Image (cartoon, rainbow, N blue to C red):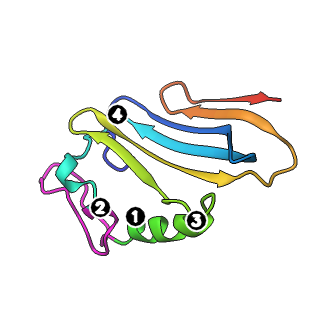
């Protein structure tokens, strides 16, 4: 989201079933600068920074994604992979992970888009 200057940022949470467990898949998608495939693995490493341009905000020391990744591995279903990423340079990225749903009020999906500034929820 830090590198999305135009377009949109979309946050989605939707109910899925994994091994008979009700889970929620959370994703954050943007139309930012995207990430080269060769850089996808290293972005979750400590002190890793992949942006090398004068026009991009380079604040931070490279710990945020590493901490988020380590923490998400402990929370994901069946000690899953944690945060995963799909990205295409100059198109955008999608970060996502899946948690077991332990919330009593059940919702099918929730979507927020920065383009429309709307938040839509679909209840069961």
Residue at figure coordinates x 75%, y 46% from the top left? 20
Please name the predominant secondary structure of the magenta segment in the image: loop
Q: Give neighbour class at mark 4: few <14, some 14-19, many 20+ (Cα, 10 Å).
A: many
Find numbered disc 3 in the image and state the secondary structure of the residue it sits on. Answer: loop
Look at mark 3 in the image and give the residue it sits on. 79
Whole-Å distance between the Cαs marked 4 and 3? 30 Å
Q: Which of 119 and 76 is in front in this view?
A: 76
Rendered view: 81 above or below 94: below
Q: Give neighbour class at mark 3: few <14, some 14-19, many 20+ (Cα, 10 Å).
A: few
- Residue furthest out toward the front: 19
**Mark 1 or 2, nearer chain start:** 2
Q: Nearer the viewer, residue 4 or 11?
A: 11
Residue 65 place in picture, x, y as percent: 40, 64
Q: What stretch is highlighted in magenta?
A: 42-62
Look at mark 1 in the image and give the residue it sits on. 65
Find numbered disc 1 in the image and state the secondary structure of the residue it sits on. Answer: helix
Residue 9 place in picture, x, y as percent: 45, 36
Which label belongs to residue 31?
A: 4
């Amino acid at each position: 989201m830090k590198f999305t200057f135009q377009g949109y940022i979309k946050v989605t949470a939707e109910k899925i079933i994994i091994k008979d467990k009700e889970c929620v898949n959370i994703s954050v998608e943007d139309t930012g600068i995207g990430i080269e495939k060769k850089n996808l693995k290293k972005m979750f490493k400590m002190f890793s920074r992949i942006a090398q341009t004068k026009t991009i905000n380079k604040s931070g020391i490279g710990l945020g994604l590493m901490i988020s990744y380590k923490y998400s591995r402990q929370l994901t279903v069946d000690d899953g992979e944690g945060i995963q990423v799909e990205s295409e340079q100059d198109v955008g990225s999608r970060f996502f992970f899946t948690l077991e749903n332990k919330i009593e009020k059940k919702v099918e999906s929730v979507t927020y888009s920065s383009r429309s500034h709307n938040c839509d929820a679909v209840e069961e």
